[in-house]
Amino acid sequence: MVLPFTEPFKIKMVESINKSTKEEREQWIRDASFNLFKLKSEQVFIDFLTDSGTGAMSDRQWSAMMLGDESYAGATSYYNLKKAINEITGFSYFLPVHQGRAAENVLFSVLIKEGDIVPGNSHFDTTKGHIEFRKARAVDCTADIAFDSTSFHPFKGNVDLDKLENVLRNNPKEKISFIIVTITNNTVGGQPVSMENLKGVRRLADKYGILFFIDSARFAENAWFIRTREEGYADKMIKEIVREMFSYADGITMSSKKDAIVNMGGFIGFKDEELYQKASVYNIIYEGFITYGGMAGRDMNALAQGLYEGIDPEYLRSRISQVSYLGTRMKDYGIPVLEPFGGHAIFIDARKFLPQIPLEEYPAQVLAVELFIEGGIRGAEIGTLMADRDPKTRENRFPSREFVRLAVPRRVYTNNHMDYVAAAVKNVFDRKASIRKGFRIKKEAPILRHFTVELERL
Ligand code: F0G
């Protein structure tokens, strides 16, 4: 008999999670103005709000923390991190920052000016926020296949190279700050970008003389998908695939809270020394001196170790398998989920789940709230609330996607937890016809409103 595949780790420390009653949860979510970000974490049983900063560090990472060097300048921890980044990504220059959006803030301060455009594949909301905050525009060149939630395509995160070339051809070069490609593409469902596509973006970047950056938060999961889905990569090591992916870019922004399995941290990687020097000035203003930039020495040590663990093929196999296990359970119950399953999360199609709720009443938010009430599960709305209003017209933007994302933290939950979540979703699915009304916004911020929005039931 072939032995089943298991997690390549055992558990040394556990953290209790709290069960509660439906009545309690109904009251808590009402008190939170139906915004899951406003809940206390102790009110949540299974927390799938995000896979960012919520992973479990290893014994090696914890021991590396004890060896952290907290010197202001030139700490050994900085050099440990430099070595890991150089070996894994191939970039010679880097700046540590406290998280991914800080990397965006520092880099974009150098490269984006008012009126610019930044083409990419479904920019993440903080990326778009940092672009629009500078009165520039994010132009989405995602391949159309990404918006078909059921057909199988191995690389739904890809850039449509024709759309990208149109943007590059029809705009003056000095108006295009850079191209940014997100791997995996979180916004369209944790879908990977192929090596072929990254090569294609590089070709266009060279042809038009534009810089090309990768938003690399989930780079290791992307490499796993290339190895398992793209011709010619089945026998390559993850390490080699990662190096090749990054070899096509001029630099990367990194939120280390995902694939590097730390609770806080990030960095910017650069090929070019001059750009690194320019960004260093902003790093010092916004983050901290260039050898710590918003991170404690111990955190840089844990990150250096985490980068190696994140590209371990045995770990990646268990990671991707667990997410896919959850997706399969839900699919078996007939729940409309995005396919193929994402690397870090399962996305439920709220329009199909609750067709009776119009987009103006935020169906994905309605579903997310119902999942909390049903099972104490906290997911995230990736839909109309998150899409914010158009900066000019102030009208709601209705994105083509209206999802609830169940993002699975790394090395935290067992497959029993996955079974529990799938069963709770099924229970809501069984009573979906009784959900008749959505929400109205009581209060919202002008940008990134989903974090603080207050809602009321219609
Ligand atoms: N880029 C991508 C693709 C992301 O998914 C995120 C964060 C960021 C940049 C920003 O990084 O949070 O460290 O500042 N994504 C989290 C999520 C918040 O839940 O998907 P950060």
Image: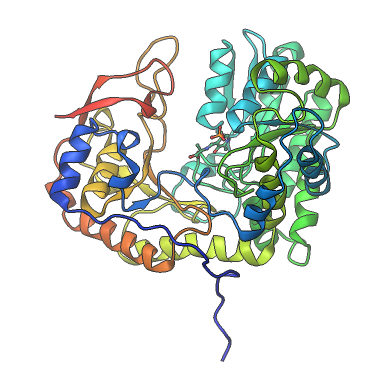
Left/right placement of residue 368 relative to residue 144 reads left
Q: Which residue occupies the extreme bottom position in the image?
A: 1
Give the camera-side residue of 403 and 172: 403
In the image, residue 447 above or below residue 358: above
From the top left corner, tell me how far across and down residue 288 is, in percent: 69, 23
Q: In the displayed structure, would residue 179 be above or below residue 63?
A: above
Ligand 1 picture quarter = top right
Determine which quarter of the picture holds residue 336.
bottom left
- Asked whether residue 277 appears in the rendered view, the answer is yes
Q: Is residue 323 left or right of residue 95?
A: left
Q: How many marks?
A: 0
Image quadrant holding the N terminus, namely bottom right
Query: Where residue 273 sits in the image (x, y, percent)?
Result: 87, 25
Q: Nearer the viewer, residue 48 or 182?
A: 48
Instruction: Name the residue located 66 percent from the left edge and 48 percent from the top edge.
Output: 65
**Image check: 335 left or right of 279?**
left
Q: Residue at x 35, y 21 (%)?
A: 396
Q: Is residue 111 visible?
A: no
Residue 418 placed where, x, y %? Answer: 39, 63
x, y (%) of residue 323?
48, 59
- Residue 447's image quarter? top left
Q: Is residue 396 above or below residue 370?
A: above
Colour scheme of the rendered structure: rainbow
In the picture, the quarter occupied by the C terminus is top left
> In the rendered view, does 233 fall on the left or right side of 403?
right
Question: Residue at (30%, 65%) from the top-left corner?
Answer: 333
Instruction: Out of 76 and 384, give the one closest to the viewer.
Output: 76
Q: Quadrant of residue 41?
A: top left
At x 78%, y 49%, the residue is: 88
